[in-house]
Image: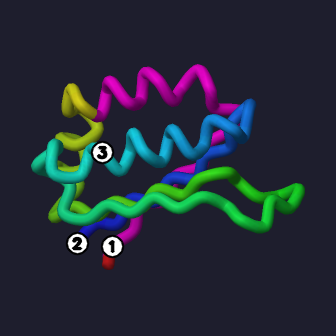
Amino acid sequence: MLTHVVLMKFTDPADAPEAKKLLEGLAGRVPQIRELSAHLDVVRSPVSYDLCLVTRHESAEELRGYQEHPEHLEVAGWLRPRLEARAVVDHEG
């Protein structure tokens, strides 16, 4: 199992709740997603990111399928111009 973790910092942190809603809407619509959770930061420290997305996939090929899926691309098109920074970690387990 491959776990895909994405941390997002928004130019305007007020966009994070809408991003969470849009990302959670991908579950059940993108077959390559085995599990999905999205979480908003509650501490808001100077080093905090605004949102953490965790998805799980059977393989790296499935992760690519998720990333190339039209539903994901639509959400990514909304997200990208609003992001100040993004960090990604993909790990097994």
Q: Are marks 1 and 2 in contact (CB under 8 Å)?
A: yes
| Residue shown at the point (35%, 50%) measured from the top left | 24
Name which residue type carries label 1. Glu
Q: Which residues are magenta?
A: 72-92
Give how far apart the Cα atoms at labels 1 and 2 are.
Answer: 6 Å
* Cα gap from disc 1 to disc 3, whole angstroms: 24 Å
Residue 1: horizontal and vertical position, in percent? 22, 72
Residue pictured at 60% horizontal, 58% vertical: 40
Crowding near the residue tagged with mark 2, few <14, some 14–19, many ≥20 C-alpha atoms within 10 Å: few
Indicate whether 66 appears above or below 38.
Answer: above
Task: Please rate how many residues cluster around mark 1, counting C-alpha atoms within 10 Å: few if below 14, some from 14 to 19, many from 20.
Answer: few
Q: Among all residues in the image, which is located at the extreme bottom?
A: 93
Mark 3, residues whose alpha carbon is within 10 Å: few (<14), some, or many (≥20)?
Answer: some
Amino acid type shown at disc 3 = Gly
Side of 77 where 25 appears, left or right: left
Residue 66 lies in magenta, yes or no? no
- Tell me if label 1 and label 3 are in contact, CB under 8 Å: no
Q: Is residue 30 left or right of residue 26?
A: left
The numbered mark, 3 or 2, whose residue comes first in the sequence reads: 2
Residue wearing tag 1? 92
Q: Which residue is mark 2?
A: 1
